[in-house]
Amino acid sequence: MNGNSVPLVDLSPALSLILGAAASASLLLAWLAWRVRGQGAHRWLAALTGLTLFLTFDLIVFGSFTRLTDSGLGCPDWPGCYGSASPLGAHSEISAAQTALPSGPVTFTKAWIEMIHRYLAMTVGALILVMAIASLVHRKHLPHSPYWPWLTLLWVVVQGIFGKYTVTLKLYPAIVTLHLLGGMLLLALLTVQYLRWRAPAPWLPGGVSPRTRVLTRVTTAALWLQIALGGWVSTNYAVLACRGFPTCNGQWWPTMDLAAGFVLLRPLGERGAGLQGMIGFDALVGIHMVHRLFALVLLSLMGALAWSFWQERRQALAIQRLPAGCVSPWPTLVLLALGLWQLISGLSNVVLGWPLAAALAHSAGAAAMVAATTTLWLMTRHAEPATVSVPAGRAASRVADPIA
């Protein structure tokens, strides 16, 4: 029981919530069936994957909105709200909590934000369940193993568990960060399946060099680490620990307590590791600075990868004498655009005092980067370029390594 004598886990509204998610998913499926009517199971499954991917992106952004508006405990129990399927049924309880503490974690607005997030999550889960069942029924039409949707469904269940403990453990930072990473992993899983349906042609005839493939993987790994660091900053409310840029609180190298800042197993705001008291300001500065400094590493890697793709495109056009339209520049352009987006939105959070729009833009940019790097990872899995005919006067060594 919590301080308001509310059971942290109350399964009584679960059936109503499941029926609501089923109804929402049914409406979306009916609309999807109407959109692709007469085009066969292959087209319907592809469209279902794309729709679920789109809603998952929305879910991640709305989850950030829930966290940024301090609505994560808007309904202090799980899966419902004070034992009801919606804040309407919990009117008296929410009213009492809001009257007692108007700026507290429980208000009508925060309760609705939290429950809408749960409704959307359950709808996405219902759609993925349909995907998993349909993958077995229509497995002959699948461009990938039917186990992919089932793996995705399993991960949705894990995400639901993280969501539960986010509430019951009162926004425990490690759980909230894992919940964010889990949402990004769900997005990556759906991106892979969506790309399998589209089967896009490689943008470079013959593939890319081993160097570009390795750089793609290193950049992707760095992105995931940076997202984890960003989640740690957000869940510990350390965004405003550093004021100003490029300095932090007027200092190039401020005092930091990294040991205290990166104690992972501790309640929100506490020191952890068996120590009493609240986490110190120097620890929050350390959390912020690590994220800020590693952003430089990630942006450098993204710039190097963008340049690598641009060089490969230039060499392909020169060596193979292809029209410019045959070799897409999109990897370079997308990497540069997303890097600039994240830089501007991240700086806006610091300089403008963490405005909601900038924070949401930063979260959306991170999700877009996950989708983009997952795409690059998948489409660069073949390292060596195919053999191409070399026009007279060209060195054969340039074919073996277009970046050399």
Image: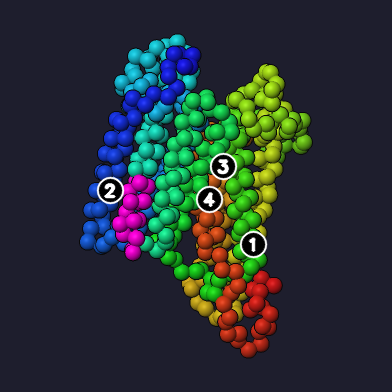
Q: Which mark is residue 214?
A: 1
Q: Which residue is mark 2?
A: 29
Q: Amino acid at mark 4?
A: Val
Q: CA distance from mark 2 to mark 4?
A: 26 Å
| Badge 2 amino acid | Leu
Q: Earlier in the sequence, mark 4 or mark 1?
A: 1
In the picture, measured across the screen, residue 33 lies left or right of residue 198, that is left
Q: Residue flagged by tag 3: what amino acid is it?
A: Ser
- Boundaries of the magenta span: 127-141
Residue visible at 44% across and 13% down in the picture = 5
Residue 210 point in image, percent of width and height: 64, 68
* Mark 3 closeness class: few <14, some 14–19, many ≥20 residues within 10 Å: many
x and y percentages locating residue 221 in the rendered image: 62, 51
Q: Is residue 398 visible?
A: yes
* 368 or 382, nearer to the observer: 382
| Residue 370 numbered mark, or none | 4
Res 345 label: 3
SS assignment at label 1? helix
Q: Position of residue 345 (x, y in %)?
A: 56, 42
- Spatial CA span between label 1 and label 3: 28 Å
Pair 4/1: label in front = 1
Pointer 2 local density, CA inside 10 Å: few below 14, some 14–19, many at least 20: some
Residue 357 vs residue 19, the one in the foreground: 19
Which of pointers 3 and 2 indicates the residue nearer the eye?
A: 2
